[in-house]
């Protein structure tokens, strides 16, 4: 039975090899100055064949290679082919609209394309269509943004007036929650549905995943440069949306793919990927696209003795928390991370809770849309469960007060004027690697409060900067990006919150990017890298990872976790090179460590640092 499935998939994959990206492939409707690169022509050809073969697939090109334009070109080309087919059918049957009052069976075909994306990308889709589609063809790609309180309520109006409807994951999730009164989007028979940043619904148990799967469509596309974020099971949610017949349930996926270490499981997995996924990387295309060089530089930072003492004091204090409950263990891990980033992050808001939101699930993009934060709210609740002891006068004692009273400790590094070793090193690099060359830099952190502390240090040095983070409105974010990208702008630094910077931002005005604090998910960090290293970048790009040099620290453990996830990602994504019996692909140790784990369960190992 498994062999039959494999043979079927391998036959599809073999047919797809014919797609070479012929320069003779013309896309009617694109502006004359919009010339598709060879890899983009090949993608359009590949997607058209996939729609003839089956229901769609996964466009997994590296970030910054023009996936949006490829989707636009697919829509244009397919409409052109449909028009040609209609004309030929009318001629063959000697039918015309004037004779029978209809356009034959073509009237019954679905024509609308639905784009689902984060809120921050809605306008970008509209702008890209305006930028690339010829004005004389705009009526063929007329867009409607389905978002906000005044949405069109009539599905017939959508179908008769528009070609492309753009909505958000949050809107779908909200409208799908009431099964009795689902929005009109669920009443439309779509020609195709495109999930942009499809990894957002990587968890099949969330309402967002259920919502996109409830839509009706002839063709379904997942567009993401990172189809795997943490583990192989991330792929299942994408194939669930694609309605692959062999993987209708998670149990089917686990049974058929297993842990990826059995040879037959691997044969099926790699056959599936070759038959359904298209992926090209910047490294493969760097010569064709004339991309500049990219250099990654790990920067090792030795903490001052009092900073090291504070870290180990906190580590010892939170060690028992893992025995209390898992949430307490999460909190202990977070506090150690904060201590390495900046001691002032440990200062509380006066209510006993650390005044931060640490979103360790990057599937959520913070777009100032409360519905977009379904999973982040749960994570925020976990990290805010901090133990508070009562003082003799009945007031709560903050975490840092508990620690400092537990053991005598010098308070000076907690003073607002104190700059820790990592921040001092950041400014040293800014001065000697960026500003003296008249270059620009992006500084990335997971936490808005950390960005505030960096901003204070920039102001002290009279360095002009702007900020793109969750609390800032979308319009202001766009304006800040525009200012930063302007060649003659006095803005030399952009402060970027990591979970906001993963989707849709183009920051090629800068060519230096600093990762101030490490994230468990290396793909989220890579998304930040690709804000600067992408098509259109003309300068060599430099990526700096600031890593504290403490043996057995939490950052050391994060790096180990990242390496395992990246190794698994590369092994899976190298599906075109897999040869049974020669290249086993997924090594047992990597798969046991990553594939079987649910989101967040890798923390169980890290909790040993709290349990002792």
Image: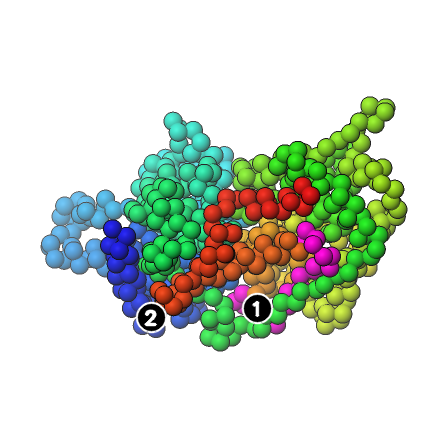
Q: Is residue 279 above or below residue 117?
A: below
Query: Residue 346 at x, y = what percent?
Result: 76, 43
N-terminal of the pair, mark 1 or mark 2, is 2
For mark 2, give the secondary structure.
loop
Within the magenta stretch, is there residue 261?
Answer: no
Magenta part of the chain: 534-555
Q: Is residue 168 visible?
A: no
Q: Position of residue 596 (x, y in %)?
A: 47, 47
Left or right position of 269 against 291: left
Residue designated by label 2: 20
Identify the residue under disc 1.
537
Number of numbered discs on residues: 2
Q: Position of residue 176 (x, y in %)?
A: 42, 34
- Residue at coordinates 72% horizontally, 32% vertically from top-left? 387
How far apart are the alpha carbons under marks 1 and 2?
26 Å
Report the residue at 82% width, 57% height from top.
Answer: 304
Q: Secondary structure at mark 1?
A: loop
Residue 430 found in image quarter:
bottom right
């Amino acid at each position: 039975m498994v062999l039959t499935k494999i043979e079927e998939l391998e036959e599809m994959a073999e047919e797809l090899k014919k797609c070479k990206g012929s320069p003779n492939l013309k896309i009617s409707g694109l502006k004359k100055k919009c010339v598709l690169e060879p890899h983009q022509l090949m993608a359009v050809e590949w997607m058209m064949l996939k729609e003839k073969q089956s229901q769609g697939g996964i466009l997994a090109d590296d970030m910054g290679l023009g996936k949006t334009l490829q989707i636009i070109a697919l829509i244009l080309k397919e409409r052109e082919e449909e028009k040609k087919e209609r004309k030929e059918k009318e001629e063959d049957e000697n039918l015309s609209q004037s004779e029978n009052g209809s356009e034959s069976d073509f009237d019954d075909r679905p024509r609308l394309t639905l784009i689902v994306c984060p809120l921050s990308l809605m306008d970008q889709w509209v702008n890209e269509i305006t930028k690339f589609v010829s004005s004389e063809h705009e009526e063929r790609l007329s867009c409607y943004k389905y978002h906000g309180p005044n949405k069109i309520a009539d599905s017939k109006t959508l179908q008769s007036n528009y070609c492309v409807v753009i909505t958000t994951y949050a809107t779908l999730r909200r409208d799908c929650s009431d099964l009795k009164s689902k929005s009109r989007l669920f009443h439309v028979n779509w020609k195709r549905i495109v999930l942009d940043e499809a990894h957002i619904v990587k968890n099949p148990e969330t309402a967002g995943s259920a919502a996109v799967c409830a839509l009706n469509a002839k063709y379904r596309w997942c567009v993401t440069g990172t189809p795997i974020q943490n583990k192989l099971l991330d792929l299942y949610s994408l194939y669930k949306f694609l309605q692959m017949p062999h993987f209708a349930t998670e149990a089917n996926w686990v049974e058929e793919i297993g842990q990826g270490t059995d040879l037959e499981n691997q044969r099926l997995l790699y056959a599936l990927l070759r038959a359904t996924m298209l992926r090209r990387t910047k490294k493969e295309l760097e010569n064709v696209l004339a991309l500049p060089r990219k250099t990654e530089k790990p920067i090792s930072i030795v903490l001052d003795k009092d900073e090291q003492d504070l870290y180990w004091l906190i580590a010892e204090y939170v060690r028992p928390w893992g025995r209390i409950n898992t949430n307490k263990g999460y909190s202990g891990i977070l506090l150690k991370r904060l201590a390495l980033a900046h001691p002032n992050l440990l200062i509380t808001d006066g209510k006993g809770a650390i005044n931060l939101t640490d979103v360790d699930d990057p599937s959520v993009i913070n777009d100032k849309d409360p519905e977009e934060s379904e999973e982040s709210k749960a994570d925020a609740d976990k990290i805010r469960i901090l133990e508070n002891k009562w003082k003799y006068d009945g007031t709560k004692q903050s975490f840092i007060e508990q620690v400092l009273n537990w053991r005598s400790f010098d308070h000076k590094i907690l003073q607002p004027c104190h700059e820790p070793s990592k921040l001092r090193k950041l400014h040293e690099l800014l001065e000697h690697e960026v500003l003296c060359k008249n270059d620009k830099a992006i500084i990335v952190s997971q936490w808005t409060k950390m960005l505030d502390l960096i901003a204070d240090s920039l102001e002290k040095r009279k360095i002009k900067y702007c900020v793109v983070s969750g609390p800032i409105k979308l319009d202001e974010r766009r304006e800040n990006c525009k200012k930063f990208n302007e060649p003659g702008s006095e803005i030399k630094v952009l402060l970027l919150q990591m979970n906001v910077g993963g989707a849709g931002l183009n920051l090629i005005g800068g060519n230096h990017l600093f990762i101030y604090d490490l994230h468990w998910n290396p793909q989220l960090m890579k998304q930040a890298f690709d804000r600067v290293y992408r098509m259109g970048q003309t300068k060599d790009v430099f990526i700096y990872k600031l890593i504290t040099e403490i043996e057995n620290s939490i950052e050391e453990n994060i790096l180990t976790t990242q390496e395992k996830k990246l190794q698994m990602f590369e092994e899976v994504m190298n599906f075109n090179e897999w040869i049974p019996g020669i290249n086993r692909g997924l090594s047992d140790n990597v798969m046991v460590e990553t594939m079987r784990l649910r989101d967040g369960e890798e923390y169980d190992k890290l909790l040993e640092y709290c349990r002792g």
